[in-house]
Image (spheres, grey):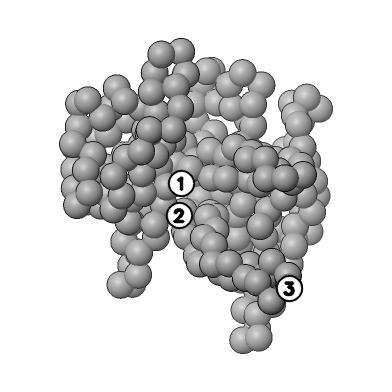
């Protein structure tokens, strides 16, 4: 992974483990586990964020329910096939676990990538301006992560006029939210969505690297 790919997707989370790690898969002899970390907001609410962690890190650290951890890594996506549809799933991929530091911001992320679907601008019944943007972030081995982002207020008005292929850097935090998905025939299901709540936007001049980038085809539920 080159320098740009190491630095175009950076996150840090400080929170409490709320689920026992579960083994999910292996890559070149390295096992990976999934768990969930509760990260406090400025209010009394918490964001419950899924994380993926290597068995190498589990050996060196006590990642157990009730323990607080300080992790750095990347916010990644992958596609899960369900029937004839491809669903985008998101996880915080842990690169390292650091000593606890109560002075750091407990939830911070910075990504640089390309708008890969037209921004969706709307207002709430209380006239709050919101814009949803899907950003493709390049990763090693010709892969890309597709990160849903949400902008508010002036940022929402600004980004609504950006085009597919425009490059930008955004800074914010990962948030989780629960919603009800209508499945038809009087059926519904409670689900959890994850997205980057953006506090800062920095547009970047477009370059030719978009030409070889795969545009997202996953359905965002």
Q: Nearer the viewer, mark 2 or mark 3?
A: 3
Residue 143: % across, % down:
64, 26
100 and 200: which is toward the camera? 100
Q: Secondary structure at mark 2?
A: strand
Residue 112: % across, % down:
59, 39
Image quadrant in which the C terminus is located = bottom right
Task: Write down the residue under mark 2.
Answer: 173
> Pointers 2 and 3 in contact (CB under 8 A)?
no
> Pointers 3 and 1 in contact (CB under 8 A)?
no
Q: Secondary structure at mark 1?
A: strand
Residue at image location 75% in from the left, 29% down from the top: 213
Q: Who comes first in sequence, dot 2 or dot 3?
A: 2
Tell me if I can see residue 14 in this picture.
Answer: no
Residue 188: % across, % down:
62, 70
Residue at image location 22% in from the left, 25% down from the top: 59
Q: Which mark is residue 109?
A: 1
Tell me how far mark 2 sits from mark 3, CA to CA.
36 Å
Residue at image location 61% in from the left, 62% down from the top: 151
40 and 10: which is toward the camera? 40
Q: Who comes first in sequence, dot 3 or dot 1?
A: 1
**Taking 7 as reference, is 181 left or right?**
right
Q: Compared to 166, does 183 lie above or below?
A: below
Q: Compared to 207, does 171 lie above or below?
A: below
Give residue 32's quadrant in the image. top left
Task: Write down the residue under mark 3.
Answer: 185
Q: Which residue in the rendered view is the most extreme toward the bottom? A: 126
Q: Secondary structure at mark 3?
A: loop
Residue at image location 69% in from the left, 76% down from the top: 186
Q: Residues within 10 Å of mark 1 (few under 14, many from 20)?
A: many
Residue 46: % across, % down:
35, 64
Q: Which mark is residue 218?
A: none
Q: Which residue in the rendered view is the most extreme toward the top? A: 28
């Amino acid at each position: 992974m080159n320098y740009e790919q190491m630095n175009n997707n950076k996150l840090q989370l400080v929170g409490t483990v709320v689920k026992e790690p579960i083994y999910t898969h292996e890559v070149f002899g390295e096992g990976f586990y999934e768990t969930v970390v509760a990260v406090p907001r400025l209010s009394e609410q918490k964001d419950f964020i899924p994380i993926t962690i290597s068995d190498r890190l589990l050996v060196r650290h006590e990642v157990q329910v009730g323990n607080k951890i300080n992790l750095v890594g990347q916010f990644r996506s992958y596609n899960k096939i369900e029937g004839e549809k491809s669903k985008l799933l998101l996880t915080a991929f842990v690169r390292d676990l650091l000593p606890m530091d109560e002075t750091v911001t407990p939830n911070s992320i910075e990504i640089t990538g390309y708008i890969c679907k037209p921004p969706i601008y709307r207002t709430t019944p209380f006239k709050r301006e919101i814009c949803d943007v899907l950003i493709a972030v390049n990763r090693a081995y010709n892969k890309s992560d597709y990160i849903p982002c949400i902008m508010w207020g002036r940022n929402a008005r600004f980004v609504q006029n950006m085009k597919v292929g425009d490059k930008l850097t955004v800074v914010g935090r990962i948030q989780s939210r629960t919603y009800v998905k209508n499945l038809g025939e009087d059926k519904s299901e409670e689900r959890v969505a994850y997205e980057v709540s953006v506090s800062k936007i920095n547009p970047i001049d477009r370059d030719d690297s978009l030409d070889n980038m795969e545009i997202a085809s996953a359905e965002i539920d």
